[in-house]
Image (cartoon, rainbow, N blue to C red):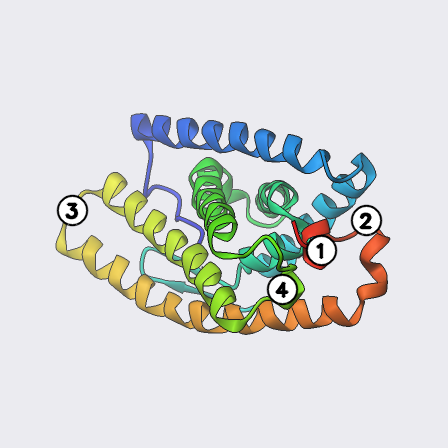
Amino acid sequence: MHIEPGVVDGAKMAFAYTTAAGAAGYTAKLAMEDLHGHNVVSFIARTALAAVGTFIFFEVLPQFAVGISEVHFILGTTLFLLMGAAPAALGLAAGLLIQGMFFAPSDLPMYFVNLTTLLLPLFAVTAVARRIIPQSTAYVDLRYGDVLKLSAMYQGGVVAWVAFWAFYGQGIGAETFQSVLTFGAAYMLVILIEPIADLAALAGAKALRGMERSGLFANRLYNAA
């Protein structure tokens, strides 16, 4: 979902800096909440795993340039369920930065635009999960319907932010509409695939229940809230 360089530029980048700063502040809040239930070593380990996962999603898994942006299998919901909200957010930010610094330097000017696009949908998923998942349910016991709702929320949020940046940066016109519609249609593939990936990851975690005390996964993965 990398927004191409030049889609947003000049004075309009100020809004990207503002939204990214807000995302950073909210991530700090989530980190403090996370550290109430996990130790620092666990937090760092989960953040590192999320960063590695993000890098793999962007550089190893298939990606396609479509319309206004690129279609990636980001699997942000998978990171959230396995690692927790704050490590997932920091991992997404770190993985995106590493990719830009070492593999796609042309993307760096759009870092804060892309960061907002990745993190704000994650925060929406965090809020929705608190509302729709019973406190008595561990994430490894989630049903397909619940996972689908979370995945659709995340991927739908990504598409919505890509569309916003396109219209904000380029204005409302026939060409921009066409590019956004093409991108959104292509992203439906991700929305169909991610719930399956989420359930596969949860099934794998359930089979590895002995890792519950390793600190490599969020407490909520195996335990009720």
Residue 192 sits in which quadrant?
A: bottom left
Residue bearing mark 3: 172
In the image, residue 197 sits, relative to residue 130, either above or below, namely: below
In the image, residue 127 sits, relative to residue 35, either above or below, namely: below
Q: Residue at x 37, y 57 (%)?
A: 156
Q: Residue at x 51, y 39 (%)?
A: 108
Q: Secondary structure at mark 4?
A: loop
Q: Position of residue 129 (x, y in %)?
A: 51, 52
Task: Tell which tag, 3 or 1, sits nearer the viewer.
Answer: 1
- Checking the image for residue 223, the label placed there is 1
Task: Tell which tag, 2 or 3, sits nearer the viewer.
Answer: 2
Given contact means CB atoms under 8 Å apart, are the residues at marks 2 and 3 in contact? no
Task: Tell which tag, 4 or 2, sits nearer the viewer.
Answer: 2
In the image, residue 8 sits, relative to residue 217, either above or below, namely: above
Distance of mark 2 from mark 1, alpha carbons? 13 Å
Sequence-wise, the earlier of marks 3 and 4 is 4
Sequence-wise, the earlier of marks 2 and 1 is 2
Residue type of the residue flagged with mark 1: Asn
Residue type of the residue flagged with mark 2: Gly
Residue bearing mark 2: 215
